Image (spheres, rainbow, N blue to C red):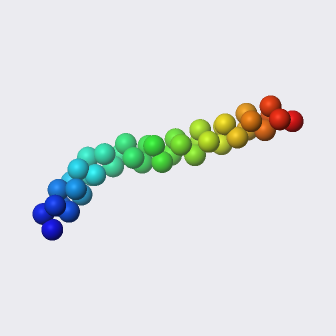
């Protein structure tokens, strides 16, 4: 139980960073897909 609490506290420190990454990654993937499709067409 103590180990899990320590892990949860560590993850809470990076919570906002992980949320930002979860927001940015799909946008970057979408832009890359559009670039690839325009190169192929």
Residue at the far top: name it: 39
Q: Residue at x 20, y 63 (%)?
A: 4
On the rendered image, what quadrant is the N terminus found in? bottom left
9 left or right, relative to 26: left
13 left or right, relative to 34: left
Residue 14 image-quadrant placement: top left
Residue at the far left: name it: 2
Q: Residue at x 73, y 33 (%)?
A: 35
Compared with 4, 21 (above or below) is: above
Residue 9, x across and y down, in percent: 21, 54
Residue 22, x across and y down, in percent: 48, 48
Residue 24, x across and y down, in percent: 52, 41
Residue 7, x across and y down, in percent: 22, 56
39 left or right, relative to 29: right
Q: Residue at x 17, y 56 (%)?
A: 6
How many numbered markers are drawn?
Answer: 0
Q: Residue at x 70, y 40 (%)?
A: 33
């Amino acid at each position: 139980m103590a180990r899990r609490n320590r892990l949860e506290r560590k993850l809470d420190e990076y919570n906002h960073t992980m949320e930002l990454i979860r927001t940015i990654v799909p946008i970057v993937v979408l832009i890359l897909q559009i670039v690839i499709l325009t190169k192929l067409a």
